[in-house]
Image (cartoon, grey):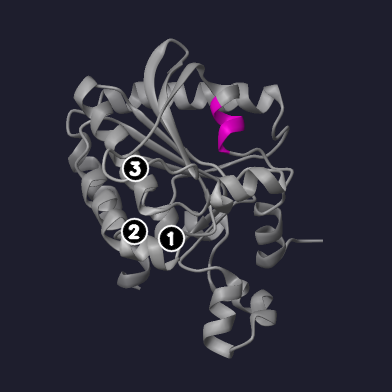
Amino acid sequence: MSQTPYSIVKKARDNTRPTGLDYIHNLFQGFVELHGDRRFGDDAAIVGGIARLEGLPVTVIAIEKGRTAKERSFRNFGAPNPEGYRKALRLMKQAEKFGRPVICFIDTSGACCGVEAEERGQGLAIAENLMEMTTLCVPVISVLIGEGGSGGALALGVADRVWMLENAVYSVISPEGCASILWKDAAKAETAAASLKLTAQDAKDLGVIDEILSEENLGKQPFYQGLRSRLSRTLTELAGDEDLVGSRYARFRRMGAQFLQG
């Protein structure tokens, strides 16, 4: 029986899926976490720092949801505040200064939409990330490992290569949020999911992502070994691009072009 878009949403949210920290600890060596945005504070929903990928120094940034109730509360359920995005940007600019590639792991239903987050400039923090990531002079790879919700995900998604796990989702809004707006009924989330084009295949067809990653052996060492090798090969390929920023710009300009032309 084929999967429906909403059944994929449920898989993307599954509490047993590997989280951002699982990827960090299984893919990289010598991870050193760095904290704070140097403006307000530290945001536990975004974890970032320096590590090595098969000997290559890299900057790693991941949105972390947590798994237990206590962890999820501490991580704000993977909904970053402005200081989280500013921390991520600080680490990206540091990576650029020292010539380190950047690897991001995205798993969020969306940025925190609380009053305090808005007071501290949530929209501006996301916009600054979008703008600055377009001009980073080091390779950037972003991987959607679960939910990719709205600007909260896009703030780490302006990359040279964007990959999605086959049961991840990428959408402008959650199905429940969409159903609440359109029909004033969150129970119609399944209908909304079918219209949002949020699956990995939808994103690939639209040119939003470059590759769909198989979830065979998800969370096991063969899975991480395969992903580690793929990351390493791709970084080597990107390092040979003499116009990295121009190629990144062209990549985003091509998105959805075939549908506009049709």
Circle nearer the N terminus (3, 2)? 3
- Callout 3 amino acid: Ala
Q: From the viewer's perspective, is residue 57 above or below residue 59?
A: above
Q: Secondary structure at mark 1?
A: helix
Mark 3 crowdedness (10 Å alpha carbons): few <14, some 14-19, many ≥20 = many
Look at 60% across and 77% down and name the residue there.
192
Circle nearer the N terminus (3, 1)? 3
Residue nearest the observer in this picture, 115 or 96: 115
Q: Quadrant of residue 145?
A: top right
Q: Quadrant of residue 260?
A: bottom left
Q: Secondary structure at mark 2?
A: loop
Q: Is residue 52 left or right of residue 226?
A: left
Q: Secondary structure at mark 3?
A: loop
- Callout 2 amino acid: Met
**Residue 254 appears anywhere in the view:** no
The residue most toward the top is 55
Which numbered marker is on residue 255?
2
Residue at the spot of label 1: 206
Residue 127 picture location, percent across and down: 26, 57
Q: Quadrant of the C terminus?
A: bottom left
Residue nearest the observer in this picture, 227 or 15: 15
- Callout 3–callout 2 Cβ contact below 8 Å: no
Mark 1 crowdedness (10 Å alpha carbons): few <14, some 14-19, many ≥20 = some
**Residue 51 appears anywhere in the view:** yes
Residue at the spot of label 3: 159
Q: CA distance from mark 1 to mark 2?
A: 6 Å
